[in-house]
Image: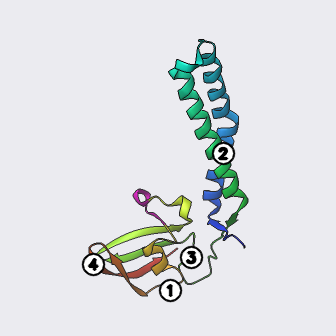
Amino acid sequence: MSKEKLKLTKEGYQKLKDELDHLEKVKRKEVADKLKKAAAQGDLSENAAYENAKDEQSSVETRISKLKGMLKNAEIVERDKNAGWVQIGSKVKVKVNGGEKTFEIVGGTESDPFEGKISYQSPIGKALIKKPKGAKCEIETPQGTKTYKILEIS
């Protein structure tokens, strides 16, 4: 059974690598120091600082493991600048509800709607992906069906 690759932009891949590096080289040491200091306080059975540090250690190790798995399964997707359609890495200017919005289509783990970054797996991303400039897409939203017209792709 093959697992689907995690599609990421080069920037998204680097961001995950940087987070992993920070957790392994900095955060692990900080948590180890907290554990050492808490353990030095004596009775561990009623030591809240020790329990908190153990919880934090578990959290850090879980995230490290998850990041390693994501990076191992990652596929860096480079945008073909000569393609005439929306793809991962594209910035897309659309007309919707009489106004204009700009989105960057990114991998699922990179999405940040507040920065205009939407996943290619989101409803809007799925509707826009592989569409050319000038195409119209109807997208179901909680507020009803909206029509997006692609004005620019860069």
Task: Single out the mark in the foreground, 3 or 2.
Answer: 2
Left or right, 106 with reference to 93: right
The residue drawn where x is 70% and y is 35% is 25
User: Are dots 1 and 2 in contact, CB under 8 Å?
Assistant: no
Whole-angstrom CA distance, mark 4 to mark 1, is: 24 Å
User: Is residue 15 a member of the stretch shown in magenta?
Assistant: no
Quick one: label 4, few (<14), some, or many (20+) residues within 10 Å? few
**Mark 3 or mark 2, earlier in chain:** 2
Task: Single out the mark in the foreground, 1 or 2.
Answer: 2
**Mark 1 or mark 2, earlier in chain:** 2
Disc 1 designates what residue?
132
Residue type at mark 4: give it.
Gly
For the residue pair 95 and 40, the one nearer the viewer reads as 40
Residue type at mark 2: give it.
Ile
**Mark 2 or mark 4, earlier in chain:** 2
User: Are dots 3 and 1 in contact, CB under 8 Å?
Assistant: no
Q: Magenta stretch: give its range.
A: 113-118
**Element assignment for label 2:** helix
Disc 3 designates what residue?
87
Disc 4 designates what residue?
144
Whole-angstrom CA distance, mark 1 to mark 2, is: 39 Å
* Residue 24: % across, % down: 69, 38
* Residue 121: % across, % down: 51, 72
Disc 2 designates what residue?
64
**Mark 4 or mark 1, earlier in chain:** 1
Residue type at mark 1: give it.
Pro
